[in-house]
């Protein structure tokens, strides 16, 4: 009897520990996977694709926007995993900045949903709107190529 309770409790404890540390790629929080796009725009938004090819030139352009004019690095970190260890999580005001190396998150989001975030921000969180005041739509697509490349780098680092 006690043993059976442990079978249930131990995985729950382990999973909550991983979530709390945001350290596991497999234990993605379901909250993170639910789309940020307003529901009546979701179907159309999901169909939009990035018009730029994922060439080294455009990824490099996106990287310079990530670290420069777009200041994504300030919240998403130098390696795209989110706040740096020395940053106060309270600064993100609720939801934490996304971990771009999270494979599950990368898979469930389409390019259109990512562009939507840059055009609208993520309502109710610290994620600001970037297009059109800070980035043009073209620049947004390029920075998103860099965000996608962070997902691929994580895969090749793991193998
Ligand atoms: C001031 C902090 C801050 C800055 C600067 C910032 N972000 Fe974010 N970002 C966040 C937070 C917080 C979230 C999580 C919001 C949520 O959970 O809905 C987020 C989420 C995201 C998401 C994921 C939304 C989803 O659908 O899961 C994308 C994509 C994103 N940011 C891209 C960027 C890019 C690209 C830049 C730079 C142009 C940037 N962010 C700059 C704080 C920031």
Image (cartoon, rainbow, N blue to C red):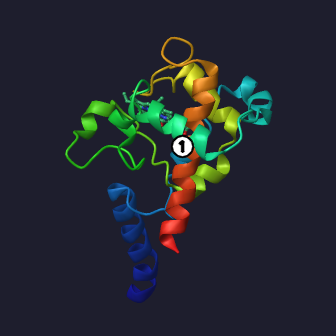
The vertical placement of 21 against 125, above or below, is below
Residue 68 at x, y = what percent? 39, 29
Quadrant location of the N terminus? bottom left
The vertical placement of 100 against 49, above or below, is below
Q: Residues within 10 Å of mark 1 (few under 14, many from 20)?
A: many
**Residue 96 visible in the displayed image:** no
Residue 33 at x, y = what percent? 58, 47
- Quarter of the image where one finds residue 125: top left
Identify the residue at the far front of this view.
57
The vertical placement of 43 against 124, above or below, is below
Instruction: Tell me the element at label 1.
Output: helix
Residue 102 at x, y = what percent? 51, 55
Q: Going by the image, does 146 lie left or right of 2?
A: right
Identify the residue at the far top of this view.
133
143 or 23, nearer to the observer: 143
Q: Residue at x 41, y 88 (%)?
A: 3
The vertical placement of 4 against 27, above or below, is below
Q: Going by the image, does 23 lie left or right of 52?
A: left
Q: Which residue is mark 1?
A: 147
Query: Is the CB–ligand 1 distance for label 1 below 8 Å?
Result: yes
Q: Going by the image, does 75 lie left or right of 137?
A: left
Residue 21 at x, y = what percent? 32, 58
Q: Residue at x 58, y 27 (%)?
A: 140
Count of numbered tags = 1
**Residue 115 visible in the displayed image:** yes
Q: Residue at x 52, y 23 (%)?
A: 121
């Amino acid at each position: 009897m006690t043993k059976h309770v442990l079978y249930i409790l131990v995985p729950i404890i382990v999973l909550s520990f991983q979530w709390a540390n945001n350290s596991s790629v497999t234990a993605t929080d379901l909250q993170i996977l639910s789309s940020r796009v307003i529901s009546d725009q979701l179907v159309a938004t999901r169909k939009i694709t990035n018009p730029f090819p994922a060439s080294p030139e455009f990824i490099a352009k996106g990287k310079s926007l990530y670290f420069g004019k777009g200041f994504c690095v300030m919240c998403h970190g130098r390696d795209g995993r989110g706040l740096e260890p020395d940053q106060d999580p309270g600064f993100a005001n609720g939801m934490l900045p996304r971990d771009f190396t999270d494979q599950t998150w990368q898979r469930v989001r389409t390019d259109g949903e990512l562009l939507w975030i840059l055009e609208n921000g993520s309502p109710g969180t610290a994620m600001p709107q970037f297009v059109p005041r800070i980035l043009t739509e073209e620049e947004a697509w390029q920075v998103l190529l860099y965000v996608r490349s962070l997902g691929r780098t994580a895969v090749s680092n793991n193998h």
